[in-house]
Image: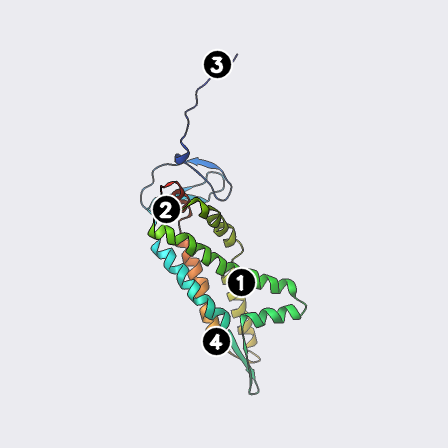
Amino acid sequence: SPPSRSVAAVPVDNVVACRCCGLVHRQVPLERHEKALCVRCGARIARGRTASWDRPLAWALAGLVLSGPAMLLPLATVGRFGSFHEGLWLTAIRTLWTGNMPTLAAGVLICGLLAPVAVLILLTVVLLPLRFQGSLSPALQSLLRMVHHGVQWSMPEVYLLAVLVAFIKLGAIVTVTIGPGLWCYAGVSFALIQALHTFDFEQAVRAFRKPA
């Protein structure tokens, strides 16, 4: 029989899986500002710094505060020959739906409104115990996974750019005045981007192994 070979066991706490392709890596010490990349897909799997939860929590809360006005206040006022009309996000979605464009209406509703707000809510729920307790209960593990998947459906900056392009084109034939709702929606988009940029997923996953 072939000679047996002993393999050194790697503790579970010393390995990390890539969130993009699932490849398992051995953790190595990282200096500040250093990062470890997946050898298969090149995605970042670890950062060499201690995560601060203040910044992502502040951005997530700011995005939630602006979400209400973004949905309820007028996006823009369109006028021609003295007749002016205000448009909201929900009225725009309803117009697309009744105009035989249900797929586009559903895309705007899900990717432009529901998904960004859902990600901000989930981030806030996850960040509060991280900020004030320093650890996460196993019950929140599914929420962290939902944040990861929800980001793929959240595209507020894409729809913001589309609206701006449409307003520029409409400006040649009608008078378009940007309303407070669009500015608030821009704030939601920026806050979401900053919250996700400053949120350390790897550090949050490691927080599940800490005692409560």
- Which amino acid is tagged 4? Gly
Which image quarter: residue 110? bottom right
- Which amino acid is tagged 1? Gly
**Residue beneath disc 4:** 179
Residue 150 position within the rendered picture, expressed as x and y whole percent measured from the top left: 51, 53
Discs 1/3, front: 1
Lower sequence index among marks 1 and 3 = 3
Which image quarter: residue 28? top left
**Circle on res. 142:** none
Which residue: 54% across, 73% down?
88
Residue 204 position within the rendered picture, expressed as x and y whole percent measured from the top left: 40, 47
- Which amino acid is tagged 3? Pro
Q: Are dots 1 and 3 in contact, CB under 8 Å?
A: no
Which residue: 49% across, 74% down?
73
**Residue beneath disc 3:** 3
Discs 4/2, front: 2
Q: Which residue lies furthest to the right in this view?
A: 100
Lower sequence index among marks 3 and 2 = 3
For this view, does 62 lie left or right of residue 106?
Answer: left
**Circle on res. 112:** 1
**Residue beneath disc 2:** 135
| Mark 1 vs mark 3, CA separation in Å | 60 Å
| Mark 3 vs mark 4, CA separation in Å | 76 Å
**Which residue occupies the foreground of this view, 197 or 167?**
197
Q: What kind of element bears circle 4?
A: loop
Q: Which residue lies furthest to the left in this view?
A: 32
